[in-house]
Every structure is written in structure tokens, then in C-alpha cells.
Image: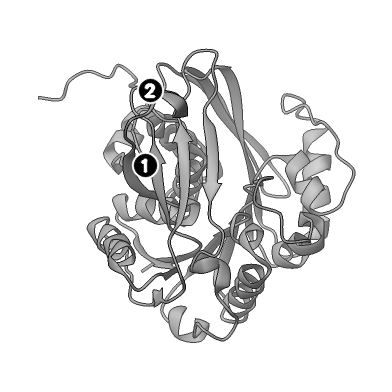
Amino acid sequence: MNKVVTFGEMLLRLSTERHLRFSQAGMYRSTYAGGEFNVSVSLANYGVETEFITRLPDNDIGKCALMEMRKCNVSADHVLLGGERLGIYFLETGAGTRGSKVVYDRAHSSLSTIQTGMIDWHKVFKGATWFHWSGVTPAVSESAAEVCLEAIKVAHEMGLTISSDLNYRSKLWNYGKEPDQVMPELLKYSNVILGDLDTAFFMLGKQQQNPDYQDKDTLPKLYDILFKECPDLQTVATTLRYSVSASHQKIGGVLYDGKELVTAAIREVTPVVDRVGSGDAFMGGLIYGLLQKGFDKEKALNFAVAACCLKHTIAGDYNLATMEEVEKLVAGDSSGKVTR
């Protein structure tokens, strides 16, 4: 039986309602968030056993975050308590031609002050088959990056499949190191990578190529550069997003396994309810698809794209679409009819 462990920061998300600007908001809707946690929630919805590893403050807000994890059927057995505070991000939800905005308030958060040796990763990974992390965690602080590497090395030693979502956040890399000084060592152990090629090349210190994702002859050669840099890599996927407006998105995907290039048809999503977390929904769908023995690469990719599309229709950070809803969209039913 599969068990997926994810590691990252859990955040309090404060978002404006009804597409109000920050300057107009008299109140904010509070929910919980975090890229790696979002992935765990998706997988739990699909019936996969998941566990989220993080560090939370030992106060009422941290305990509420723990309750949220358990409510979402995500195990919190190895969550650390300590540190000063829970990280926060503010979201101004865009509409039409006005994009959304994010303001981070994560300095001195509990996860940012985590240290190596605090987590017994051998104990955490006992019975697990998959470990997932993202580029957000090593951007939070140097010590968080060191703990992430510590986890990756133990997961590699214990034979877990390791996946990573590149998730570049320019506003977070502010502790004196650039991604290409940190990410190459982390990524070299990855078996599955989700991200666009330019972000991957940037993080690996390679020249960016401005790839044409419609060029099926050149694209495999560019992906091969990643396979050369990451010797354990088995699968790389890219979410294709064409933004017509904040309220209208077109979503597709590409997957390459070192031999075959697979593409998914572009799907239109309009109106968009909440775009944030849609990449994590893609990642959760991809992991689920790759775990299924009955799924080939094309079906796994289409499942990921459909999950991503459905997330755009759901408020909050994580995808609450069921496996049945995703499979219905994969099968071509996008009617949105009432189920009675």
C-alpha cells in the first residue's frame, strides 16, 4: 500500500472576499494553506494515505492548524511544535484583466527556524513509499533548506520515490543565497519533477532556452538536459497555462519520461473561482496517476490536468475535488450539471 509523505510550511491564508482590493477590505477570510500540504489534501481525497511534516507554534493558532490537517484526513503524527509563529500570506483575488496579488508575512515563522536533527526522518519514512517537497521550502530560510536536504537524503537512502515541484517564489529568496546555489544539490535526487523548463534551467544555473512546448521535436532534447543534471530522474512534467485573464484560464500539460513525450489537450476554465493552489492540484493528480498500476503516462497526465482545472472552481488553497469528479472530467464530461 502506498503512503506519501510531504514536507513544507503550513500557512494562515487571509484573503479578501468578493474580489475586493486590500484597500477596500474590512475583513479577511481565514483559511489554511501551503503547497506541500495542498498536495497531501489532494491525495487524501483520492484515498491515498498521506502524512504532512511541518513545524507549528505551540499555541492556539498552531493547534487549529493541526485540527485542519486531521479534518482533511492528513496524518500529523510527526508534526513538531515550537518556534514563534505561524507564517501568513495575504491574498487579493483578481478578476478579469486585474491579476491577483500576494503579500507574505513569514519572517521568524516556526518552519523558518527549524534545524537539522529535529526530525527523525528514518522514523517518519518507515512504511512510506513516496516523499514530496517543493522549491518553496528551501526559499523560506537557509535552515529550512538544510532540513529539506536532510529529508531528501534519508528518503533516497530508504528507497522512496522522490518528487519535487520547482515552485519558484522570487519574494521568498532573501536570505543571501540564490536558487542556483541551493537547488541543484536538492534536485539531483528527484525521480519526478514538476515545473517549466526555464525555471528548471534557472534553478540549475543553466542558460534559459525559451522553449516552444508545441515543438515536439526540440522539446525532448531540452528535457534531456534535466535528465543529465538529475541522474535519478524518471519523469518530468510541465503544466501549460495560457492566461486569457484572471477569470479565464486555459490549462494543458506535457510529460516526458526520457523516451516518450506525452501531451494533454488544452482545457478551458471560466469563470475562475480561485487560481491559487491549482499547481499543487496538478502535482497531487500527477502523483496519484503515477502511483496507479492501471494508469499509463498519458492517463496520469490527463488526470493531473483535470485535477488542476477543477481546483480553479474551488475557493481556498487546496483541491477538494473527488476522484470521481476528476475522472468524470478526464472522460470528457465538463457540463457541470447538477447531480441529483
**Nearer the observer, 137 or 300:** 137
Quick check: 202 left or right of 13?
A: right
Considering only vertical position in the picture, is 332 above or below 60? Answer: above
Residue occupying the point 33% across, 30% down: 26
Residue shown at 39%/42% (left/top)?
14
Labels 1 & 2 near each other (Cβ < 8 A) = no
Residue 319, numbered label: 1
In percent of width and height, residue 38 lies at 42, 50
Q: Position of residue 39 (x, y in %)?
A: 44, 52
> Which circle's residue, 1 or 2, is located before the other in the chain?
1
Residue 24 seen from this side? yes
Disc 2 is placed on an element classified as loop
Q: Amino acid at mark 1?
A: Asn
What's the mark number on residue 332? Answer: 2
Task: Look at label 2 and name its amino acid.
Answer: Gly
Which residue is drawn at the image coordinates 58% and 65% (left, top)?
Answer: 162
Residue 314 or 62: which is nearer the viewer? 62
